[in-house]
Image: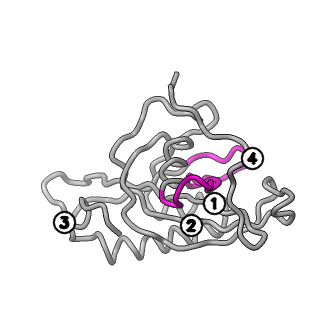
């Protein structure tokens, strides 16, 4: 059992222009295909199962008024996927409609997600949502096939571009904590 507890409720939830603000990330790591050469490293992304149907998701959730969007993304990665790491870059804002998160402040279920790339440094054996979430490490092509929502595929494509521009062949950047 874990001492960590997931936040629940909506009393601190942020809204803007009828949209629920959420934050999330694409957790990633490197898997060596051949340990003799850094150039053969394969990037893998971490996805989690959806609680409401088929397909896989990236960790994301409500951005609360006592945290930054980056802090919310890191918290969601810990709560939903059981990973800790460093935010390495901002991937963009993505709008979508949620069927399960309609409320008085967002009656149509409109959401705006701030998404980040998170380099995983630690994978926990125990985490708040471990009883309802399963983790899957996938290559980018595999992840594209399993994405539940089109906006997450768009985010993953942006991640692939961002990764190619910022991290491939740049090990100094990889271990800094800026974006």
Dot 1: few (<14), some (14–19), or many (≥20) neighbours within 10 Å?
Answer: many
The alpha-carbon separation of the residues under discs 2 and 3 comes to 25 Å
Counting every numbered tag in the picture gives 4
Q: Residue 52 — which label?
A: 4
Q: Could you tell which of marks 2 and 3 lies nearer the N-terminus?
A: 2
In the picture as drawn, the residue positioned furthest to the top comes out as: 1
Q: Which mark is residue 114?
A: 2
- Residue 31: % across, % down: 30, 52
In magenta segment, residue 72: no
Residue 103 relative to residue 46: left or right:
right
Q: Horizontal and vertical percent for residue 173?
A: 24, 67
Principal secondary structure, stretch drawn in magenta? loop
Comes first in the chain, label 1 or label 2 = 1
Q: Residue at x 30, y 61 (%)?
A: 177
Residue 22, label in figure: 1
What whole-number distance in Å separates the C-alpha atoms at marks 1 and 4? 18 Å
Relative depth, front residue between 103 and 118: 103
């Amino acid at each position: 059992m874990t001492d960590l507890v997931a936040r629940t409720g909506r009393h601190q939830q942020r809204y803007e222009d009828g949209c629920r603000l959420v934050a999330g990330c694409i957790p990633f790591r490197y898997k060596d295909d051949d340990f003799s050469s850094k150039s053969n490293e394969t990037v893998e992304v971490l996805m989690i199962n959806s609680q409401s149907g088929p397909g896989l998701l990236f960790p994301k959730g409500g951005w609360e008024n006592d945290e930054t969007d980056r802090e919310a993304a890191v918290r969601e990665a810990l709560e939903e996927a059981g990973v800790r790491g460093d935010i390495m870059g901002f991937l963009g804002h993505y709008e979508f409609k949620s069927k399960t998160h309609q409320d008085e402040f967002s009656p149509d279920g409109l959401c705006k997600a701030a998404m980040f790339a998170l380099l995983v440094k630690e994978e926990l054996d125990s985490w708040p949502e471990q009883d309802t979430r399963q983790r899957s490490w996938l290559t980018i092509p595999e992840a594209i096939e399993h994405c539940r929502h089109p906006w997450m595929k768009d985010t993953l494509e942006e991640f692939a571009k961002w990764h190619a521009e910022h991290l491939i062949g740049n090990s100094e950047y990889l271990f800094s904590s800026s974006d």
